[in-house]
Amino acid sequence: MASATALVNSLKTSDSNMSGRSSLPSTDLKLSSWSKEACCDFNFGGVLGKADIVRRPAFKAWEGLVYSMPKDSDGSIAVALCLRGEDFERLRNDSVFSEYFTYVG
């Protein structure tokens, strides 16, 4: 048991960009949700008016990050995932996942 614990501890990394807590990037997920923020209700006036969608412009690649965007004006929520290629392909090909989510690239 001690050797298993030592192995797990050696695999942990400190992700100071997110929480500063130890994590196992290949198995842990970090969730950041802005889905309850009413960003599409903001009125920028003039020709801009209200936004139909709000997106985060750039992401640093953090394996295991799940980021829920603010709700679109139609109530839908876009989700950004940062996964390893093989994990992402497995998820994309999962029939249950495909019933609820649409891959948009």
Image: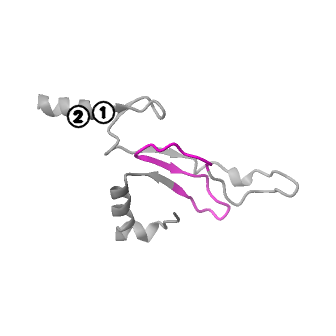
Q: Nearer the viewer, residue 35 or 103?
A: 103
Residue 101 x/y as whole percent: 47, 66
The residue tagged with tag 2: helix, strand or loop? helix
Label 1 neighbour load within 10 Å: few <14, some 14-19, many 20+ = some
- Taking 72 as reference, is 46 left or right? right
- Verify whether residue 98 appears in magenta: no
On residue 69, the disc is none
The dominant secondary structure in magenta is loop
Gap between marks 2 and 1 measured at Cα: 6 Å
Residue closer to the observer: 36 or 92: 92
Total numbered labels placed on residues in the image: 2
> From what the image shows, is residue 53 above or below residue 33?
below
Q: Is residue 30 above or below residue 48?
A: above
x and y percent of residue 22 in the render?
35, 31
- Looking at the picture, the colour scheme in use is one colour
**Of all residues shown, which one is farthest toward the right?**
46
Horizontal side of residue 72 vs 81, given as left or right: right
Could you say whether the residue bearing mark 1 is in a helix, strand or loop? loop
Magenta span includes 65 = yes
Labels 2 & 1 near each other (Cβ < 8 A): yes
Q: Nearer the viewer, residue 94 or 60?
A: 60
State the residue at coordinates (64%, 59%): 72
Quadrant housing the N terminus: top left
- Name which residue type carries label 1: Lys
Residue at which label 2 appears:
8
Give the image location of residue 83, x and y in percent. Answer: 40, 51
* Extent of the magenta region: 56-79
The image shows residue 59 at horizontal and vertical percentages of 54, 45
Q: Pointer 1: what residue? A: 12
Q: Amino acid at mark 2?
A: Val
Above or below, comparing residue 95 to residue 46 in the picture = below
